[in-house]
Image (cartoon, rainbow, N blue to C red):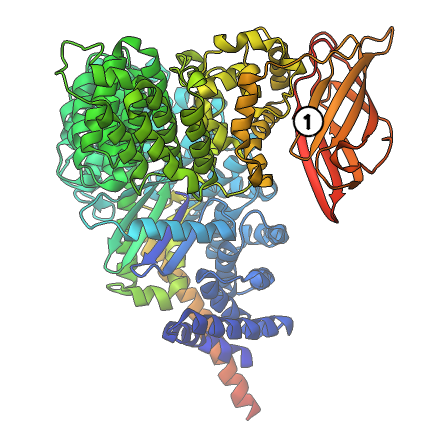
């Protein structure tokens, strides 16, 4: 009795909850109501209360729709499904489909109930079960229940047959092996008159063809004729009010028949042939003033494009698309563009005829249409039409709205790169893009542009002048500024002297100080980010040498960054300032023009290491924290004035890499190179920078190996060295400018080889302002692979080091054995030393040289200090 | 069809039906993404949105957006027609349907959708047939209720 009362008030109660939820003014209020309801439902579930189950589930479904968790209701669904009455089952199945999906284990529990319901005498209950099975069945359930569904395909009531047909689609999608069982029953559905059954039967056959080639063959042989006839009947059928939509009888059936014919006709000339007539009829006779008719036309075009060649039909189809394209309805234009994308592979010429219209669509106000049209234009571009198309697109770039500029720029750049036969054209187009939408250009793109510019030696003058002009008008485009700054730095004198004038150019007068102005402007713009400013500094350094008259002014600009809070800028400012002021003699060599960047290697690299490029550019964008000696890849890369992916060959040795860094041709320093190993090279960072790059030298041969063994260690290793000047500055501010000292040392002190009597010269493995480590080498007789190293630690500071620990790490091809150190206390000021013996076995002896990373820890004045370093200057042949 | 969504103009979900597996988390994300994408589109623009390699066909009826997600190579125009088909059936069932009908009788809307689509495929192209099937099932429920209530009156009379 109670139960029936609850049944009656079920909807009311559920309505009350919905009303309460709708009355909530804030999200918090709503959450409170839902929480209360959920608690009540949980309690009721816990009591196993049969009478409220129905209502609880209804409430739960509503709560679920609002996005709250409802897993505790899952078992309730199963209980309702197991109940005997239709209302309970109806609600239970609805809950099952809403609250569960095929991946939940609970679902397996319902298999048995489903099986019973599929055999129920009430056809509506069978319908419910089929519907649930079709919407959420898993592969296991599909296997278990396939025979039932197969049987139901022949059920007396057509409404069950159609549900069974769709359910079969789900089953064969989940378990394609079962497809063959369904081929025959599906074929017999095609002979039905009932539209629902026919509709679903056709759909089932289409999906069978997709999963089973056997089914495809079968239907192609046995059913093509029949289907053509069915389509003919539907097309020519008299007015049927039940199925009529906008004057067409059952467009859904039309479309599904056309789709199945497409599958059957694809790749089979005979089948295609037999459907030609009806396709022609559909394509010509269908009314195109309503959406339903257009949907049929659209489907028939798709079918004509896919089946085997019939010239006449194709012309018809392209004409339909042409008509669509000029339609005022955006939907129709969208599908036309969509279909033209497919048609382009079949008949490019026909699509090219509509180029003007498609180009108009790129400028449409609708983002979906613009995107489709842009994709299509991208496919349409070829050698012959690239120039006019490009002009159109770039013109449009000026007026397009902001959010579309990114996409458009990317596509334009990609087209320009693809068809960059003439360099001058490529450079011209890119300059236009940079001036219009430079802020949307991706890093790889302008990097590639610089590589191309660097390779086009006859266009250097032209490019730099064009960039100069562009800078005057579009100085707010970041990437334009970068490219311009780079080029002016490299080819500044060509700008001033009008070198390499092309016929098409008008001469311009630019003074040296104008050129500096431009760069100063670039560096001072408040929108310029770190990379741009850093590039400006490098360019200024280069100009200081090329325009001696401006040297003083450049120095003034550079000095302004001495106090910059950004470490990178500060460092450059200080270094460049000292180069300009004190090292006239090496400056010209330091700032010589960059060697031509290797185009092939660059593009190969780009293709190969996109993620790497992404990561570095992120680093660049990041403002570097101050005072950290161990910086990331960015500063290195910035020195170059480019991101690391521009560094020519991936296989280039560390030496070349560094050489590129400063753009130095090392020939003037090569006489010194022989002394390299004996030098205090661990300390002299800049010196190292310079000497390590000498082509035939010992150190270069070791670096490539290391590079190939691990790329990471290359980066960080080089970086540590590069960045150590900062740590020097930081640790000994009173010691003047260490960089200068180092340079002075380099210039005035040709190093004295320190022979130690052994076959291999000893090296300074590590030196900081506080510590020096010397390595002496010897070989154990008869074992060339093993090297004995005696490490000698000297304290340069006035304090005693205690708890001194030396650690070393080597790559995999080396084996390292450390003997105990002679002591763990290191007396102050070099009054004594610690020695420690190391034994290194090189499994790649003769092929690879030694490399080692160091870490030294000690206590000084009760402070723990950790120093790290890497040794790359091992003598050759160890 | 991968899923069907009904979203109100305020971004509230009125009906969801998933024919492809999406976890609860993904579902919320999908709904959030799509409502952001669709609700902001102007009235004159086309009814298709490209999204995660799929297409979402949507159509606005009064304050409700009906959205269906389909594959790249499905027929967008036909899906528009299916949406309209669904709306007409709802309209016929509720008698000029409005958003409130779908809120308070959300289960009815689901029953109708289940008669129209199974496994993401169209099941019936005749509005009349769908209406007939729903009516038959509703009357089954009514009959069960009546039976129960007459039973309860009998019991209550007997216990008097």
Camera-side residue: A803 or A176? A803
Label 1: chain letter: A
* SS label for mark 1: strand
Q: Quadrant of residue A775?
A: top right
Residue B141 horizontal/vertical position (percent): 44, 67
Q: Quadrant of residue A465?
A: top left
- Where A296 falls versus A761 (above or below)? below
Q: Is residue A11 left or right of residue A286?
A: right
Residue A366 horizontal/vertical position (percent): 21, 41
Q: Residue at x 56, y 28 (%)?
A: A719
Camera-side residue: A145 or B82? B82
Near mark 1 (Cα within 10 A), the count class, few <14, some 14-19 or many ≥20, is: many
Q: Is residue A309 left or right of residue A753?
A: left
- Where A796 falls versus A83 (above or below)? above
Could one spot residue A321 in this view of the protein? no
Camera-side residue: A792 or A182? A792
Tell me the residue that label 1 is attached to.
A766
Q: Quadrant of residue A508?
A: top left
Residue A251 horizontal/vertical position (percent): 25, 39
Residue A608 horizontal/vertical position (percent): 49, 21
Quadrant of the rendering where the C terminus of chain A is positioned: top right
Could one spot residue A640 in this view of the protein? yes
């Amino acid at each position: 009795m109670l139960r029936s009362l609850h049944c009656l008030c079920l909807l009311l109660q559920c309505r009350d909850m919905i009303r309460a939820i709708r009355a909530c003014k804030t999200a918090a209020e709503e959450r409170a109501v839902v929480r209360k309801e959920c608690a009540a439902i949980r309690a009721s579930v816990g009591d196993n209360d049969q009478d409220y189950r129905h209502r609880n589930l209804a409430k739960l479904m509503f709560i679920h729709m609002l996005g709250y968790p409802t897993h505790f209701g899952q078992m309730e669904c199963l209980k309702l499904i197991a109940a005997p009455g239709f209302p309970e089952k109806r609600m239970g199945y609805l809950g099952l489909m809403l609250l569960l999906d095929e991946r939940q284990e609970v679902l397996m529990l319902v298999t048995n109930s489903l099986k019973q319901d599929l055999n129920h005498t009430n056809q509506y209950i069978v319908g419910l079960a089929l519907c649930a099975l079709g919407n959420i069945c898993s592969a296991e359930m599909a296997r278990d229940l396939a025979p039932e569904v197969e049987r139901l395909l022949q059920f007396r009531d057509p409404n069950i047959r159609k549900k069974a047909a769709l359910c079969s689609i789900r089953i064969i999608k989940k378990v394609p092996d079962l497809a063959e069982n369904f081929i025959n029953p599906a074929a017999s559905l095609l002979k039905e008159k009932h539209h629902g059954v026919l509709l679903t039967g056709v759909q089932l056959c289409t999906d069978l063809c997709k999963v089973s080639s056997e089914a495809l063959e079968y239907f192609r042989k046995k059913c093509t004729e029949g289907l053509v006839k069915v389509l003919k009947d539907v097309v020519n059928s008299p007015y049927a009010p039940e199925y009529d939509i906008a004057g067409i009888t059952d467009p859904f059936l039309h479309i599904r028949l056309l789709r199945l014919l497409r599958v059957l006709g694809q790749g089979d000339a005979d089948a295609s042939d037999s459907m030609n007539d009806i396709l022609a009829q559909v394509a010509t006779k269908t009314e195109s003033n309503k959406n339903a008719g257009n949907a049929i036309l659209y489907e028939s075009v798709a079918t004509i494009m896919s089946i085997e060649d019939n010239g006449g039909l194709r012309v018809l189809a392209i004409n339909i698309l042409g008509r669509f394209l000029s339609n005022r309805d955006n939907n129709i234009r969208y599908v036309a563009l969509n279909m033209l994308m497919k048609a382009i592979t079949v008949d490019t010429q026909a699509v090219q005829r509509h180029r003007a219209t498609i180009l108009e669509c790129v400028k449409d106000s609708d983002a979906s249409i613009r995107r489709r049209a842009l994709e299509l234009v991208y496919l349409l571009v070829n050698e012959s039409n690239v120039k006019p198309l490009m002009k159109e697109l770039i013109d449009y770039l000026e007026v397009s709205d902001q959010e579309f500029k990114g996409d458009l720029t990317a596509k334009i750049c990609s087209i320009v790169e693809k068809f960059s036969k003439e360099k001058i054209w490529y450079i011209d187009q890119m300059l236009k893009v940079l001036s219009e939408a430079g802020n949307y250009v991706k890093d790889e793109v302008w990097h590639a542009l610089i590589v191309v510019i660097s390779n086009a030696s006859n266009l250097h003058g032209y490019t730099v002048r064009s960039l100069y002009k562009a800078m005057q008008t579009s100085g707010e485009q970041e990437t334009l500024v970068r490219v311009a700054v780079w080029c002016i730095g490299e080819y500044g004198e060509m700008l001033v002297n009008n070198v390499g004038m092309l016929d098409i150019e008008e001469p311009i007068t630019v003074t040296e100080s104008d050129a500096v102005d431009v760069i100063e402007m670039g560096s001072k713009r408040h929108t310029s980010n770190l990379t741009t400013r850093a590039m400006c500094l490098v360019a200024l350094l280069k100009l200081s040498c090329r325009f001696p008259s401006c040297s003083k002014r450049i120095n003034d600009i550079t000095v302004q960054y001495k106090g910059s809070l950004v470490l990178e800028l500060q460092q450059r400012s200080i270094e460049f300032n000292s180069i300009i002021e004190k090292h006239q003699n090496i400056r010209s060599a330091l700032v010589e023009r960059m060697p031509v960047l290797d185009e092939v290697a660059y593009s190969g690299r780009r293709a190969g290491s996109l993620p790497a490029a992404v990561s570095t550019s992120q680093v660049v964008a990041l403002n570097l924290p101050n005072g950290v000696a161990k910086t990331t890849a960015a500063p290195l890369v910035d020195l170059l004035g480019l991101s690391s992916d521009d560094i020519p060959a991936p296989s280039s040795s560390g030496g070349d890499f560094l050489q590129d860094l400063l753009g130095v041709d090392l020939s003037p320093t090569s006489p010194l190179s022989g002394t390299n190993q004996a030098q205090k090279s661990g300390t002299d960072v800049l010196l190292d920078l310079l000497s390590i790059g000498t082509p035939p030298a010992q150190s270069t041969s070791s670096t490539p190996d290391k590079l190939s063994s691990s790329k990471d260690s290359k980066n960080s290793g080089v970086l540590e060295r590069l960045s150590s000047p900062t740590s020097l500055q930081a640790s000994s501010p009173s010691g003047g400018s260490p960089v200068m000292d180092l340079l002075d040392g380099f210039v005035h002190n040709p190093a004295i080889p320190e022979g130690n009597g052994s076959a291999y010269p000893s090296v300074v493995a590590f030196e900081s302002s506080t510590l020096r480590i010397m390595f002496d080498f010897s070989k154990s007789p008869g074992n060339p692979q093993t090297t004995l190293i005696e490490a000698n630690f000297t304290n340069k500071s006035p304090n005693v080091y205690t708890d001194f620990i030396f650690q070393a790490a080597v790559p995999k091809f080396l084996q390292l054995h450390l003997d105990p150190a002679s002591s763990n206390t290191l007396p102050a000021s070099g009054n004594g030393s610690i020695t420690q013996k190391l034994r290194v076995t090189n499994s790649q002896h003769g092929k690879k040289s030694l490399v080692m990373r160091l870490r030294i820890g000690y206590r000084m004045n009760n402070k723990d200090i950790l120093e790290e370093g890497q040794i790359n200057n091992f003598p050759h042949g160890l | 069809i991968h899923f069907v969504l009904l979203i109100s103009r305020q971004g509230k979900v009125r009906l969801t039906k998933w024919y492809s597996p999406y976890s609860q988390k993904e579902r919320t994300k999908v709904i959030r993404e799509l409502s952001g994408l669709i609700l902001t589109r102007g009235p004159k623009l086309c009814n298709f949105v490209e999204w995660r390699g799929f297409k979402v066909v949507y159509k606005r009826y009064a304050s409700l957006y009906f959205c269906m997600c389909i594959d790249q190579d499905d027929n967008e125009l036909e899906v528009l027609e299916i949406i309209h088909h669904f709306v007409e059936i709802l309209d016929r069932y509720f008698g000029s349907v409005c958003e409130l009908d779908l809120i308070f009788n959300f289960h009815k809307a689901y029953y109708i959708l289940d008669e129209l689509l199974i496994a993401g495929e169209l099941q019936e192209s005749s509005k009349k047939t769908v209406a007939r099937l729903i009516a038959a099932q509703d009357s089954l429920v009514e009959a069960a209720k009546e039976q129960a209530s007459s039973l309860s009156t009998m019991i209550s009379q007997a216990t008097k």
